[in-house]
Amino acid sequence: MVLAIATICESIAALDVEGVKMRDLDEIPEEVLARECPVIFPRPDGFISSFVVERDSFGGGSTAKMTATYVLTYRFLQAPVASGRGLFEVYNKMVINAFAFLDAVIAVDVMSGLIDIQVNNTLNFGPVSDPAGNIFHGCDIELQVMEFIN
């Protein structure tokens, strides 16, 4: 039995989203500098949620067929708040970049490590923080993942 979370996160980080820096699990920044924006990375607090494993066949734990579903939350940062640019100067680009990421996720036919990936929730654009607590214009993006085990 092997869950493929590392492979899935690598696959998401490898998506080609023009103009947006994609980060993997081992690339979560401790602090984001303005020049690193726009950037998407696994949200360090609450990254994995709604984890459920369902048995699809009989057998022992290591041989039974199972389906795992869970939500991965990514943090998208467009630009620092108070960087001299107001919300309405960055809002257009923020929406375009976030939807470019969503488009890349939706357009994937095959992604290593999983069976299905879908956008899970609405985007709430507004102030969000980097791991150091600095405030940025951005949002959290939730992705519902399904993978087969065994």
Image (tube, helix red, strand yellow):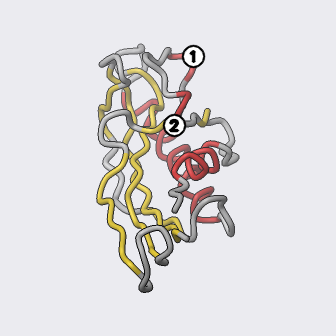
Identify the residue at image location x=39%, y=47%.
Answer: 73
| Residue nearer the viewer, 49 or 93 | 49
Q: Is residue 124 above or below residue 30?
A: below
Count up the numbered dots.
2
In the rendered image, residue 41, in percent from the top left (x then y), is placed at 49, 36
Q: Is residue 8 above or below residue 56?
A: above
Q: Residue 40 shows which numbered tag?
A: 2
Identify the residue at image location x=45%, y=73%.
Answer: 67
Identify the residue at image location x=56%, y=46%.
Answer: 6
Labels 1, 2: front one: 2
Q: Which amino acid lies under the numbered mark 2 shown in the image of this protein?
A: Ile
Q: Residue 35 shows which numbered tag?
A: 1
| Residue nearer the viewer, 50 or 20 | 50
Question: Secondary structure under badge 1?
Answer: helix
- Hey, which residue is sitting farthest front in the picture? 60
In the rendered image, residue 90, in percent from the top left (x then y), is placed at 46, 32
Name which of mark 1 and mark 2 comes first in the sequence: 1
Identify the residue at image location x=57%, y=52%.
Answer: 8
Number of residues whose C-alpha sits closer than 10 Å to that of mark 1, classed few (under 14), some (14–19) or many (20 or more): few
